[in-house]
């Protein structure tokens, strides 16, 4: 993916870097040697996952570690439903590997191209008000710290540090492997249907509480919400997956192919965005299917975009959405990408966006060729007035002092950082901004 001296880019093309050196370790020992060598050379070092973060959290200005060779399943404790997974393993591969042991990840977002280490380190989550994000299921982490030491943090060994290391932003070291608590394999019955926007927003919290997994999308300039409700069923339940042709038409041709053309048209002729959005909602029909959980949770995404996402208290959802809608109208912006709404349970992970509270997630997007900053800054200000916490892997503009006010355990996290990386070997400009130097 990246050669020494070449430019590294993230998936969204919002961040680039030209590392001085690139290394591809395939073992814990190789990671330790790379960290010690970087320290001896006075170079910062960062591990990059799949590049699916929209922020500069993985930008390496010194040594870049690519963990593609540090991939695979280490061990499974079937009685406790624990799976230990190497850090560079893609989520899609995690689902495949643990399925052979009758297990599944409890929840997933709609993209599974991230590495497991990148996903927990940035707070990746799915939807479901009874289910936390991936970091909330972490039960152990093996990490190489700033002096090259190998530390294993678990429920039995330094458990007081687990809520910090489970979502560490890459600031505490280079993760080697993760032990995550899984669940017995299950299937999902999916119901996807367009519904009136106002009624959907009004009923969103109630629907989230009576559904296993509820979310919806709203295309600006329309009065339609595209709702998705997934119900968990035993693995022995009869599956009725989408026919291959229907899946190709819906997910590849319509959701990616035609939608890419619509976004490209809107970028050149913004006046076309409202009618194109209305056409998109009309072309998105209802569908019902039942399949293995990971095949329902995730959807292929090939249209590039920039994204901002904030977690707000569930009770603030309607007010925030109303302000965003009025903002778009007042500014006369033509927004081709939908606003996405999801939910998550509270957890006790120190820097989780759902730490200590149930959360509603509001994500806004722009096609990667459209200017996004004015829109994102304005939405961030709205979310901030309602106690919003920005997703660590998605674009935001907050600094350490603003973030400190959002997280009661923020200074405790900084104390752990001081213990694990006093020389700031794992720092970069993004971490300097959000955590302080």
Image (cartoon, rainbow, N blue to C red):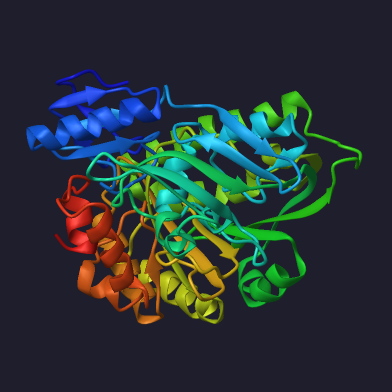
Q: Residue 356, position in %: x, y?
A: 50, 75
Residue 300 falls left or right of residue 43: right
Residue at 46% of width from left, 49% of height from top?
Answer: 120
Instruction: Judge whether 235 appears above or below 249 on screen.
Output: below
Q: Residue 314, position in %: x, y?
A: 56, 76
Instruction: Judge whether 177 appears above or below 54 on screen.
Output: above
Query: From where the camera sits, is residue 330 visible?
Result: no
Q: Which quadrant is the N terminus positioned in?
A: top left
Q: Residue furthest left?
A: 42
Foreground pick, 156 / 108: 156
Q: Residue 258, position in %: x, y?
A: 52, 33
Residue at 37% of width from left, 51% of height from top?
Answer: 393
Q: Which quadrant is the C terminus positioned in?
A: bottom left
Image label count: 0
Residue 5 falls left or right of residue 289: left
Foreground pick, 37 / 426: 37
Instruction: Judge whether 218 appears above or below 72 on screen.
Output: below
Query: From where the camera sits, is residue 120 visible?
Result: yes
Q: Residue furthest top?
A: 3
Residue at 44% of width from left, 42% of height from top?
Answer: 117
Residue at 38% of width from left, 43% of height from top?
Answer: 143
- The quarter of the picture where residue 129 lies is bottom right
Q: Residue furthest front?
A: 157
Q: Residue 384, position in %: x, y?
A: 34, 76
Residue 320 falls left or right of residue 197: left
């Amino acid at each position: 993916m990246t050669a020494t001296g070449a430019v590294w880019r993230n998936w969204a093309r919002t961040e680039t870097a030209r590392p001085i050196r690139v290394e591809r370790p395939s073992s814990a020992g190789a990671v330790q040697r790379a960290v010690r060598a970087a320290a001896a050379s006075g170079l910062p070092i960062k591990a990059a996952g799949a590049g699916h973060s929209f922020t500069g959290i993985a930008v390496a200005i010194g040594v870049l570690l690519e963990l593609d060779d540090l991939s695979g399943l280490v061990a499974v404790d079937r009685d406790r439903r624990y799976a230990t997974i190497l850090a560079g393993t893609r989520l899609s591969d995690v689902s495949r590997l643990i399925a052979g042991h009758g297990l599944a990840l409890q929840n997933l977002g709609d993209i599974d191209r991230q590495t497991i280490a990148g996903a927990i380190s940035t707070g990746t989550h799915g939807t479901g008000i009874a289910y936390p994000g991936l970091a909330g299921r972490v039960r152990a982490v093996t990490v190489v710290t700033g002096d090259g030491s190998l530390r294993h943090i678990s429920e039995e060994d330094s458990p007081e540090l687990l809520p910090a290391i489970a979502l560490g932003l890459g600031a505490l070291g280079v993760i080697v492997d993760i032990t995550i608590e899984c669940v017995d394999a299950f299937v999902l019955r999916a119901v996807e249907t367009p519904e009136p926007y106002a009624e959907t927003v009004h009923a969103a919290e109630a629907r989230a509480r009576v559904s296993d997994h509820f979310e919806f999308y709203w295309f600006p300039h329309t009065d339609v919400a595209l709702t998705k409700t997934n119900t968990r069923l035993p693995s022995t339940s009869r599956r009725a997956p989408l026919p291959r042709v229907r899946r190709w038409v819906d997910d590849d041709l319509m959701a990616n192919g035609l939608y890419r053309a619509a976004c490209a048209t809107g970028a050149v002729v913004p006046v076309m965005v409202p009618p194109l959005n209305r056409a998109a909602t009309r072309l998105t029909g209802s569908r019902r299917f039942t399949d293995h959980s990971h095949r329902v949770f995730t959807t292929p995404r090939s249209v590039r975009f920039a994204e901002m996402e904030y977690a707000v208290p569930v009770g603030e959802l309607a007010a925030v959405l109303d302000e965003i809608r009025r903002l778009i109208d007042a500014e006369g912006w033509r927004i081709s990408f939908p606003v996405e709404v999801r939910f998550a349970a509270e957890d006790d992970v120190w820097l989780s966006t759902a730490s200590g509270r149930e959360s509603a997630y509001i994500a806004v997007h722009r096609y990667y060729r459209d200017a996004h900053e004015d829109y994102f800054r304005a939405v961030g200000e709205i979310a901030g007035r309602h106690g919003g916490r920005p997703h660590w892997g998605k674009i935001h503009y907050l600094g350490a002092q603003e973030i400190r006010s959002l997280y009661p355990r923020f200074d405790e996290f900084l104390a752990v950082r001081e213990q694990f990386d006093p020389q700031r070997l794992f720092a970069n400009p993004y971490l300097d901004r959000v955590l302080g130097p």
